[in-house]
Amino acid sequence: MRHHCLLLVSLVLVSYAARSESALGGWSPIKDVNDSHVAEIANYALSEYDKRSGAKLTLVKVVKGETQVVSGTNYRLVLKAKDGSATASYEAIVWEKPWLHFMNLTSFKPLH
Ligand SMILES: *[C@@H]1O[C@H](CO)[C@@H](O)[C@H](O)[C@H]1NC(C)=O
Ligand SMILES: *[C@@H]1O[C@H](CO)[C@@H](O)[C@H](O)[C@H]1NC(C)=O
């Protein structure tokens, strides 16, 4: 009985280690782009970009996104934003360290 438990625990640990290794440095798709935290990241990216550039972009929707585990999490989002009456697509990269309540927009560019 005890042996079985140990075996199970070590199997779980091994698969967990394998998974976090493959996630580290790699980008994995965000399954639910409607998640409220994803919207929060997208809105942060736009308000930060607006603040830095003087533009007035507002979020229409997040089209897709990926996350990367670093010291914290990088979010690479493809989003649609409105600039006055024009809607365009952008790619934003936001670095979040949730335990410090830290976010930074590290890249923002229009997509063509
Ligand atoms: C996200 O919301 C949109 C519109 O509300 C919906 O069409 C879409 O299926 C949703 N996507 C997911 C992954 O829930
Ligand atoms: C945030 O990102 C910008 C652009 O990459 C960089 O210039 C700035 O130093 C960063 N700020 C912090 C607090 O890391």
Image (cartoon, grey):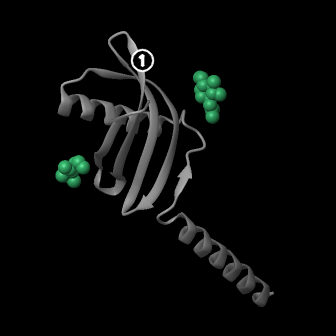
Quadrant for the N terminus, please: bottom right
Compared across the picture, whether 58 is left or right of 56 comes to: right
Q: Residue at x 66, y 73 (%)?
A: 15
Instruction: Give x and y (percent) for residue 18.
Output: 61, 73
User: Along the line of sight, which residue is nearer the eye, 112 or 59?
Assistant: 112
Type of amino acid under label 1: Thr
Q: Which residue is drawn at the image coordinates 41% and 55% (left, top)?
A: 73
Q: Is residue 31 above or below residue 15?
A: above
Name the residue at 42% across, 32% down. 111
Q: Is residue 89 left or right of residue 53?
A: right
SS under mark 1 = strand
Q: Is the residue 80 above or below the residue 38 in the image?
A: above
In this view, the residue in front, 76 or 73, is: 76
Question: Quick one: which residue is furthest to the bottom in this view?
Answer: 3
The residue most toward the front is 112
Quarter of the displayed picture in which ligand 1 can be seen: top right
Q: 21 or 110, which lies in front?
A: 110
Left or right: 3 with respect to 66?
Answer: right
Residue 20 screen position, x and y as percent: 55, 68
- Crowding around mark 1 (Cα neighbors within 10 Å: few <14, some 14 to 19, many 20+) is some
Q: With respect to residue 18, does 4 lie above or below?
A: below
Q: Label 1 CB, ligand 1: below 8 Å?
A: no
Question: In this figure, which residue is indicated by the disc labeled 1?
Answer: 87
x, y (%) of residue 54?
18, 25
Instruction: Measuring from the top left, give residue 3's x and y in whole percent.
Output: 77, 90
